[in-house]
Amino acid sequence: MSLPSAQQGPSVADVVAERTARAVSPVSPVVAFWRTTIGKKTVMAVSGLLFVLFLIAHMVGNLKIFAGAAEFDAYGAWLRTIGEPVLSHGWYLWIQRVGLLVALVAHVTAAAQLSARDLRARPVKYAHGQRVRATYATRTMRWGGVILALFVVWHVLDLTVGVVNPDFRHGQPHHNVVVDFQVWWINLIYIVAMVMLGLHINHGFASAAQTLGVTRPARRRAIRAVGTTLAVVLTAGYLVVPLGVMTGMVS
């Protein structure tokens, strides 16, 4: 009688069978699309365009600060009434915040995964002088994106939650903005973030359009012009608020 053999692990055939089963297992079309490079680029393009639309609307609202405290505070109060009576007071803003957060997470996740793929595909750095322009644009997008993500967190803590605002008062957005931009280092944070925003839009708008199918040379030139115009207008539109406070035009 032979002794019982020791318990052995799965055979090579078992491992191959398991991997084959995983490979042929049904995958949701959405998940399959997300796993592709074009899928991640599409998610970045669509979420980026949503952010641009939000930034335009947000900038227009911010510029109402030049109309005075009463009108700006009334505008802030009106935002909380959007959707009433279908939505309860303030619900619209929370729905918007959640939607923007989901878009931001998707945008950042896709960007990080695409960057990781790019580094794996190109483990050796470019030779000196090779594709300098493309490398500069890529680095600007990556590090600018990191700076903007950190700024979003700061901005929410500052003017939404109020925990880092010098003298936050609920229901008085005009006061909160003015006391904010009377502090030089807060102005510096804001200005750097807005410059990064302009650079991000200038490069990202054209990339998003190309991902979504705008590939003809004439149209690409027009898209670049639109992207640059948007970048300049949005950057200037956001920077005039702290500049207005610093120069005394807003007080």
Image: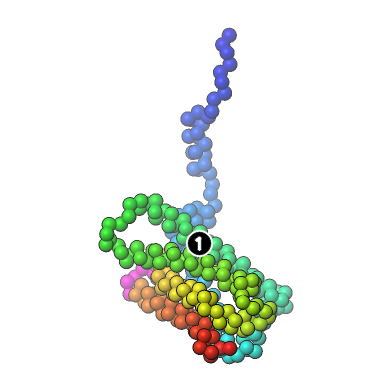
Q: Report the residue at 46% width, 82% height from top.
A: 236
Quadrant housing the N terminus: top right
- Structural crowding at the residue carrying mark 1, measured as other residues with C-alpha within 10 Å and reported as few (<14), some (14–19) or many (≥20): some
Along the line of sight, which residue is nearer the eye, 15 or 93? 93
- Residue 126 position by quadrant: bottom left
* Rendered view: 249 above or below 180: below
- Residue 101 position by quadrant: bottom right
Quadrant housing the C terminus: bottom right
* Rendered view: 59 above or below 40: below
**Is residue 144 among the parts visible in the rendering?**
yes
Q: Report the residue at 58% width, 90% height from top.
A: 67
* Prevailing SS of the magenta stretch: loop
**Is residue 56 among the parts visible in the rendering?**
no
Q: Which colour scheme appears in the figure?
A: rainbow
| Residue receiving disc 1 | 108
Q: Residue 71, image x and y in percent?
A: 63, 89
Q: Residue furthest front?
A: 184
Range of magenta residues:
212-218
Along the line of sight, which residue is nearer the eye, 61 or 136? 136
Q: Residue 19, image x and y in percent?
A: 49, 38
User: Looking at the picture, which amino acid does disc 1 mark?
Assistant: Val
Q: Residue 5, image x and y in percent?
A: 56, 18
Q: Report the residue at 71% width, 76% height from top.
A: 89
Q: Report the residue at 44% width, 64% height from top.
A: 143
Q: Determine if the magenta segment contains residue 217.
A: yes
